[in-house]
Amino acid sequence: MSRKISLTVNGAALEAVVEPRLTLVDFLRDQAGLTGTHVGCEHGVCGACSVLFDGAPIRSCLMFAVQADGHAMTTVEGLRDEDGSLGVLQDSFWETHALQCGYCTPGMLIAAEGCCRAIQIRPMRRSARRSPVISAAVPAMFRLSKRSVSPRPAGVSNR
Amino acid sequence: MTELSMTGPSNRRFVSVKRRPKEDGRFISGSGRFVGDIKRPGMLHIALVTSPYPAARILSIETGAALALPGVVAILDGAALAAVSNPLANAVHTPGVRCYSLANEVVRYVGEWVVAVVAETRTLAEDAAELIEIDYEALPFVVDAEEALDPTAPPVHAAHGSNVLYHRTFTWGPVAEDFASQPNQLSFDLRWGRSAPIPVETFGVVAEWDAGAEILEVWASIQMPSYGEQISGALGIPFNQVRAHYDVDVGGSYGVKRGIKHTVLAGFLARKLGRAVRLVEDRLENMVGGDMHGPDREFRVAVAFDDQGLVRSMKLRVREDVGGHTGRAPFQLGKPVSAIVGAYQINSVEYEAIAVSTNKTGQTAVRGFGMSPTNVAIETAIDKWRVNWGCRGWWCASVISSARISSLSDPQRFGI
Ligand code: FES
């Protein structure tokens, strides 16, 4: 019953044999060893398990690993820059302490990354890191995205 | 007197200094270590068969087909567990009430764990759990606490003889005299509804028995004190034979991450089987049988005020719907005893606490161990009193807050 799949995860080619009923998140965590992606609700409502699937965020608890055959995934482990340092979004989350327990944070990061890509904000240059600008990076990205979708109610602060 | 020197923020190490929280580094890089990330060599997995009835007698459990499935290592039921372990502690004297990780003889709520299946993977354990056949004889049940108080109501814990698990009246000061001397009184009923906090990470535990050192190693998503004591008490081993690893990241809790029944079950199986055993709730197990409901209370409040609107005396009667397992619920009625007047200075108080069993999910220490409902009762009394005296409209809030301030305890009583 098991099937062979080939996919790209965080830029690396992977081959695996999986049961058709194995969810993508269980595959990533248990077979690919990428435990940064977490399972929350297990039914597609919380987003903790989000990964980029061919560049767009999806909830990996709602997909089977066999459906990922031939596609490219990015997980939180793949958000670092090429030189291995933290990606600008990761750095912004840290700078602004954009988390509490940290469990869903990988999903938040993937959603923010997907959001930036969708509205074509280029992640800020590395040279901008650790400047005051960084602390406003994520809110700024979200503000921009909001403006393009719907106007803010009058009188609501942007902060 | 020493003069306060005004130093700039840069002279301080923590206050007003921009700092990055240390733990964030691992969370934003995906390298946190939650219980679901912990792997031990040869680790086995538990899946659970749960009760579809609010009350039923367990007639038979057929496990043959499940045991025959390749990869299934063991199957445990409540009778076998109860024979070799102690009931879970509830910190209140409740004769005849014996709760274990798995239901023994009868089930008391929908979702109660009945059988544990241990297999090489969680998937196999779930496959095997589906093959287990349990015969039940449905029994009458009760889900309303007021009805449960009726002596003819179905008994949730028959051996206890009544659904009242705890009933005690505490009196501080001359309550009867204060009520008799204050003509300004009001009384009302208040309901604090059951809540079910849902952490984004379900509860999970990995247990391993170190046969050489004779120590039970436990990694769990916990944030509670006296964890090791309660595990050792139920398993009948000394406290110093339980080593809880407190360095596991916890994905949210709201006070519900206690996991005693989970850990006793996993710990028992790990020791018996000589292999590491993991039990991570799936979302369904968490929501139905995770025993993480909060207080469910009905208050009757009476307050006597003097002519300045200051509270002289208060009577609180509270009826707690504990559910089918004792958990923390009867004990949590005790916390208000240490803070029964809230922030106020009240001359006398009567507090009558009643804990009642019903065929509902059990409770745990949600948000502050049961104090919040009592605070709501006290604050509601203050609000109602002011409104009763014609304090309506926009200025009401400021009058209420001044009543609060004037009723507040003298700071010197706190030694400030
Ligand atoms: S785990 Fe919640 S959406 Fe997938």
Image (cartoon, rainbow, N blue to C red):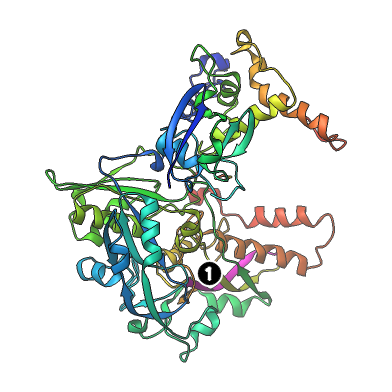
Task: Answer yes or no: is residue B39 visible.
Answer: yes
Of B330 and B45, the residue lying toward us: B45
Callout 1: CB less than 8 Å from ligand 1: no
Tell me which corner region of the image, top left, top right, bottom left or bottom right, holds residue B213: top left
Q: Is residue B115 magenta?
A: no
Where is residue B4 drawn, in percent x and y?
54, 21
The one nearer the camera, B24 or B121, is B121
**Horizontal and vertical percent position of residue B59:** 34, 81
Q: Is residue B313 magenta?
A: yes
Image point 66% across, 69% down: which residue? B305
Q: In the displayed structure, would residue B338 be above or below residue B24? A: below
* Subunit bearing disc 1: B
Query: Residue A53: percent from the left, percent from the top?
Result: 60, 32
Residue reaching furthest to the top: A127
Viewer can see residue B172: no
Kind of element beneath mark 1? strand
Left or right? Give the position of A13 relative to A146.
Answer: left
* Residue type, label 1: Ser
Residue at position x 63%, y 65% in the image: B311
Give the residue at the far right of this rendering. A154
Quadrant of ligand 1: it is top right
Task: Please report the residue visible at 48 percent of the width from the left and 15 percent of the height from the top.
Answer: A84
Q: Find disc 1 in the rendering and name its residue.
A: B348
Image coordinates of residue B159 in percent, x first then y, are: 32, 83
Picture quarter containing residue B335? Answer: bottom left
Q: Quadrant of residue A150?
A: top right
Magenta part of the chain: B309-322
Category of crowding for the residue at label 1, using alpha-carbon neighbours closer than 10 angstroms: few (below 14), some (14–19), many (at least 20): many
